[in-house]
Image: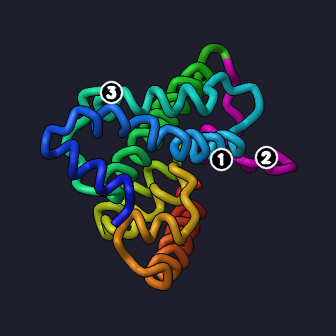
Amino acid sequence: MSELTLILERIGRGDQAAKEAFFPLVYEELRRLAAGKMSTEAGGHTLQPTALVHEAWLRLGGDAQPGWQNRRHFFGAAAEAMRRILIERARRRSAVRHGGGQERVDINDVEVAQPLPLDGRLLALNEVLDRFASLDPEKAELVKLRYFAGLPVEDAAQAMGISPATAHRWWVFARAWLIREMQGSL
């Protein structure tokens, strides 16, 4: 059983010292995961990994954390919070870019196809991931832990309580499904 799970159990029993030890225990891991995720973001973004961690922490309840069952439960919720933050930011940034005197161009008139802007890809991924979650919530959770929280397959497997081999199989399937759906939606 991980140290985090033990702390969560102590918090459930009302241990104040465990509550105080919780954030410092998860902070560095959340910060590392956020930094990994932010390194793939487009240049010029204003959100920093520390801000992403703090905003996610506040959305998770701040110092008045709900009763997390285990490591999987906490990191699943953290990954979802980070995903929502990034999606909301992408929506806000892209909303300014639509309309406002911009000219719409038919894609068939463009000689060289431009890659979809990062915000557009993130929004498309979010839409496809929501559909995937309705079909297979466990594999969708794995995708959230891998993509939005930046966990390696082995850590995501541990967080979900599944074997690394199962996580690898699920990841291959989920990735293929999402890529196929993303290609169909773009």
Residue beneath label 1, please?
36
Q: Position of residue 89 (x, y in %)?
A: 52, 28
Crowding at dot 1, Cα within 10 Å, few <14 / some 14-19 / many 20+, comes out as some
Q: Earlier in the sequence, mark 2 or mark 3?
A: 3
Camera-side residue of 31 and 10: 10
Q: Position of residue 139 (x, y in %)?
A: 39, 69
Residue 3 is marked as none
Circle 2/circle 3 CB separation < 8 Å: no
Q: Earlier in the sequence, mark 1 or mark 2?
A: 1
Magenta span: 102-121
Q: What is the distance, in whole Å, between disc 1 and disc 2 at their CAs?
A: 26 Å
Q: Residue at x 58, y 25 (%)?
A: 93
Residue beneath label 3, please?
62
Which secondary structure, mark 2? loop
Circle 1/circle 2 CB separation < 8 Å: no
Circle 3/circle 1 CB separation < 8 Å: no
Label 1 vs label 2, nearer the camera:
1
Q: Determine if the magenta segment contains residue 175.
A: no
Looking at the picture, which amino acid does disc 3 mark? Answer: Gly
Q: Earlier in the sequence, mark 3 or mark 1?
A: 1
Camera-side residue of 29 and 48: 29
Left or right of 87 on screen, residue 97: right
Q: What is the distance, in whole Å, between disc 2 and disc 3 at their CAs?
A: 41 Å
Residue beneath label 2, please?
114
Looking at the picture, which amino acid does disc 1 mark? Answer: Gly
Q: Position of residue 32 (x, y in %)?
A: 61, 44
The quarter of the displayed image where residue 147 is located: bottom right
Which secondary structure, mark 3? loop
